[in-house]
Image: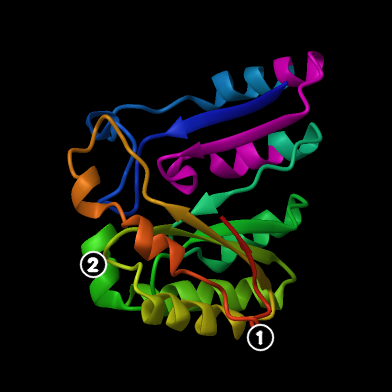
Amino acid sequence: ININFELTMKCYADCCYCYANRQLRDRAMVSFDVIKNLIKEAKDNRAYKFDINGGEVLLHPNIKEILSELTRNGYMPLVSTKMPINHDMLNHLKDVGLKKFQISLDSIDENILKKMICVPSGYLEKIYNTINYAQSIGLEIEVNTVITRYNSESHILEQLIEKLSGFKNIHTLRLSPYGYSIYKKNFNELSPSKNQLQLIEIPNDSKLQAID
């Protein structure tokens, strides 16, 4: 049994490609007691994996307790985030035994990011600070990039790859083409063309492992 549990629909960003029902953004929240019981039940039934997602999992008010409970029961979830993470939370990820986490980063061009995920100026610098501090305490990072028409040009992705290659704790880049959602009406507008996807490639001299 593999469990993938949606903790919350609260978000840090407002992504143009979001798959979720945003009407639930401010009212869908699972309590820690419920989650704790589910983790126990998963372990009792020998569930192999227990992953968490959202929304933004780090916005759950009990995320530290949830991560501690998961790792205490032998589960190592891959925390995925778009949020810049403060040192206290990064230290907690390390302290509970996690070896890595995932950052979703679609571009290193702030104008593109404003179009794609509606984040303010200064966002990238905070993300770089997150990556650097994670590196300093020994946390590995995987990066997920959602490909839309905004960021599918080769030179845009090459800039991203070159930047990420400069961090010693980033080895994996996952390229995820924008997918259809019943809650979004902009699939044809945002979805990259077949030709654009075929032209995407990771330079041979890059240290990053690309997964698509």
Give how far across and how far down residue 112 sits, in percent. Answer: 26, 71
Report the amino acid beneath label 1: Asp
Which of 64/141 is in front? 141
The residue sitting at 59% across, 49% down in the picture is 79
Which residue, given by chain and number where applicable, does mark 1 sit on? 205
Mark 2: secondary structure: helix
Up-down relation of residue 183 to residue 95 (above or below): above
Image position of 90 with respect to 109: above or below:
above
Range of magenta residues: 41-68
Is 50 one of the magenta-colored residues?
Answer: yes
Answer above or below: position of 53 versus 39.
Answer: below
Instruction: State which quarter of the image contains the C terminus.
Output: bottom right
Left or right, 175 with respect to 71, comes to: left
Question: Could you tell me if residue 201 is visible in this image?
Answer: yes
Spatial distance from mark 2 to mark 1, Cα to Cα? Answer: 30 Å
Determine whether, in the image, residue 206 is placed left or right of residue 154: right
Residue 13: % across, % down: 31, 54
Q: Which residue is mark 2?
A: 114
Q: Earlier in the sequence, mark 2 or mark 1?
A: 2
Q: Quadrant of residue 51?
A: top right
Amino acid type of disc 2? Lys
Number of other residues with Cα within 10 Å of mark 2, as a class: few under 14, some 14 to 19, many 20 or more: some
Kindly check if marks 2 and 1 are in contact, taking CB atoms under 8 A apart as contact: no
